[in-house]
């Protein structure tokens, strides 16, 4: 049965310590990219919002962290995300390997731009 979380803090606290640190840094990266953002739990996972609407979702799994959706971006961005793209709308970052937080920040910024219609 799926767990229901009332906050992102509660969601992150449900993971082992080593994963909590990664999730906190993903969260920080998203908020850094979208300074005026809010947050909520949507579809059972952390969601960074802008004007009350989703910008980017992130989730912890047994062996990776996922970030959704994937923005269009330019050819350079597409090449940069290629090693992490596992589905049309998903980026998967393996746990136990360095997480490219700058890339996650860039992803969130592009998604915020799309949300704003830029």
Image (spheres, rainbow, N blue to C red):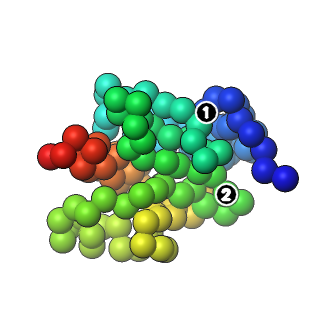
Residue 18 is situated, as x and y percent measured from the top left of the image, at 68, 45
Q: Which mark is residue 61?
A: 2
Q: Which residue is disc 1 drawn over?
A: 8
The quarter holding residue 74 reads: bottom left
Q: Which mark is residue 25?
A: none
Question: Which of the two discs, 2 and 1, labels the residue nearer the N terminus?
Answer: 1
Element class at badge 1: helix
Image vertical order of residue 38 relative to residue 82, above or below: above
Residue 78 is situated, as x and y percent measured from the top left of the image, at 27, 70
Q: Is residue 104 visible?
A: yes
Q: Residue at x 71, y 35 (%)?
A: 5
Element class at badge 2: loop
Residue 56 is situated, as x and y percent measured from the top left of the image, at 42, 47
Nearer the observer, disc 2 or disc 1?
Answer: 1
Q: How many marks?
A: 2
- Mark 2 → mark 1, Cα distance in angstroms: 15 Å
Residue 21 is situated, as x and y percent measured from the top left of the image, at 60, 39
Q: Looking at this view, is 38 or 22 the one in front?
A: 38
Q: Residue at x 35, y 33 (%)?
A: 50
Q: Is residue 32 visible?
A: no
Q: Residue at x 46, y 56 (%)?
A: 68
């Amino acid at each position: 049965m799926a767990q229901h979380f009332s906050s992102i803090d509660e969601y992150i606290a449900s993971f082992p310590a080593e994963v909590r640190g990664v999730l906190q840094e993903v969260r920080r990266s998203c908020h850094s990219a979208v300074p005026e953002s809010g947050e909520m739990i949507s579809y059972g996972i952390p969601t960074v919002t802008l004007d009350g609407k989703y910008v980017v979702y992130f989730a912890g799994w047994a062996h990776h962290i996922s970030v959704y959706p994937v923005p269009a971006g330019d050819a350079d961005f597409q090449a940069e995300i290629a090693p992490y793209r596992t589905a049309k709308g998903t980026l998967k970052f393996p746990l136990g390997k360095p997480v490219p937080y700058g890339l996650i920040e860039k992803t969130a910024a592009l998604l915020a731009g799309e949300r704003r219609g830029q």
